[in-house]
Amino acid sequence: MPAAHNRRAVAVILLVPLVVTLSLWAFSWPAARIAPRDVPVGIAGTAPAADQLQHRFEQRGGAFEVHRYDDAAAARDAVEDRVVYGAFVITGKGTQLLTASAAGPVVSQLLTEAARGAAPAGAALPVTDVVAAPAADPRSAALGASILPLALAGVAAGAMVTLLKLRGARAALALGGASVLVGVAATAVTHSWLGVITGDWWTEAGAIGLTVLAIASAVGGLAALLGTKGIGVGALLMVLLGNSFSGVTSAPELLPEPVGVIGQWLPPGAGGSLLRSVAFFDGAAAGPAVLTLTAWAALGLGAVLIGGRRKPDAAETAGHHRREPALTS
């Protein structure tokens, strides 16, 4: 067997277990370490009971980040604006919990359990879901599952542009056009058919399209600068890390540090946060996600345009010359 074949066989033997190990680490480790870490929660009221509740949260070793509000109206506004995941309203009549299951059912359940644990034995604690998840997807399972297909669509678009040897402005236009159509098609499925997102239709399509464009541009840009191996780098970054670190199925604040922060810097995590904002919260707190996705798209498209000005490599030129007689004959 030639030496080159031996090296390839060894590469397969070593690389496959390495990829599997990295995949298990990226997907399983964050899921196995889910716990509250600086989860924003509100407390409304000035009674001594409010101070006592805040003290209990602060004793949880950094699990919660407490925001104080004067009354129930201010606390409700904070929940609706995605400043906090939930708020405890304490009055002379007792304690009430305001949650937003649309922001993350896992966090909503966590706060409900914490509230019931803090309530006196036998006491009823009213829970109001201020921004409820849609009836078609009460656990946000479909929303969480939608991020991986969007990541794969972006990787596929970037890879196809590279393999079809589209360069410069043609490549950028192809990436943009594919992202727009994915946004429309995905919104038709998730909003019009499944009913798992319930915001403004075209705003949701724009959010999905921007997410796919950011991923596709990053993959296409890496390929334009590094060659076809840039596709693999982009796929690992967007699917292996971006999807598993996104926190869409739980919440970024429940993932191990600094995974939650890193996930929001990558397009899948930012896209999931943006889609949740426009689908259920009228765009509240969407700014950071839009900025992150726009930056990835701009840098990726810039790399695609810069790569389009480079001369084709020797292999591509040779392939063109080999095909030319057949095309002209």
Image (cartoon, helix red, strand yellow):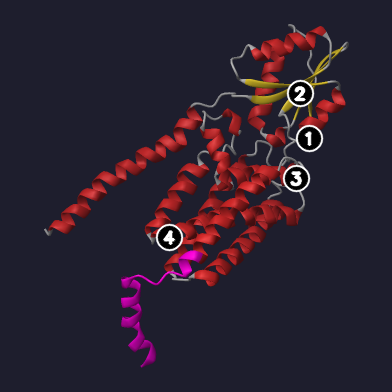
Residue 30 placed where, x, y %? 49, 31
Mark 1 or mark 3: whose residue is earlier in sequence: 1
Residue ID at (48%, 56%): 219
Amino acid at circle 2:
Ala
Asked whether disc 3 touches disc 2, contact meaning CB atoms under 8 Å apart, the reply is: no
The crowd level at tag 3 (other Cα within 10 Å; few <14, some 14-19, many 20+) is some
What is the spatial separation of the Cα atoms under label 2 and label 1, in whole angstroms?
A: 11 Å
Mark 1 or mark 4: whose residue is earlier in sequence: 1
Residue 145 falls in which quadrant of the image?
A: top right
Mark 1 lies on residue: 80
Residue 87: which numbered mark, if any? Answer: 2
Relative to 251, 29 lies left or right: left
Residue 33 placed where, x, y %? 50, 26
Residue 302: which numbered mark, if any? Answer: none
The crowd level at tag 1 (other Cα within 10 Å; few <14, some 14-19, many 20+) is many
Residue 225: which numbered mark, if any? Answer: 4
Q: Which residues are magenta?
A: 306-329
The crowd level at tag 2 (other Cα within 10 Å; few <14, some 14-19, many 20+) is many
Asked whether disc 1 touches disc 3, contact meaning CB atoms under 8 Å apart, the reply is: no
**Judging from the image, what secondary structure is the residue with disc 3 in?**
loop
Relative to 181, 168 lies left or right: left
Amino acid at circle 4:
Leu
Residue 153 visible in image: no
Residue 169 falls in which quadrant of the image?
A: bottom right
Residue 220 placed where, x, y %? 48, 60
**Judging from the image, what secondary structure is the residue with disc 2 in?**
strand
Relative to 221, 115 lies left or right: right
Mark 3 lies on residue: 283
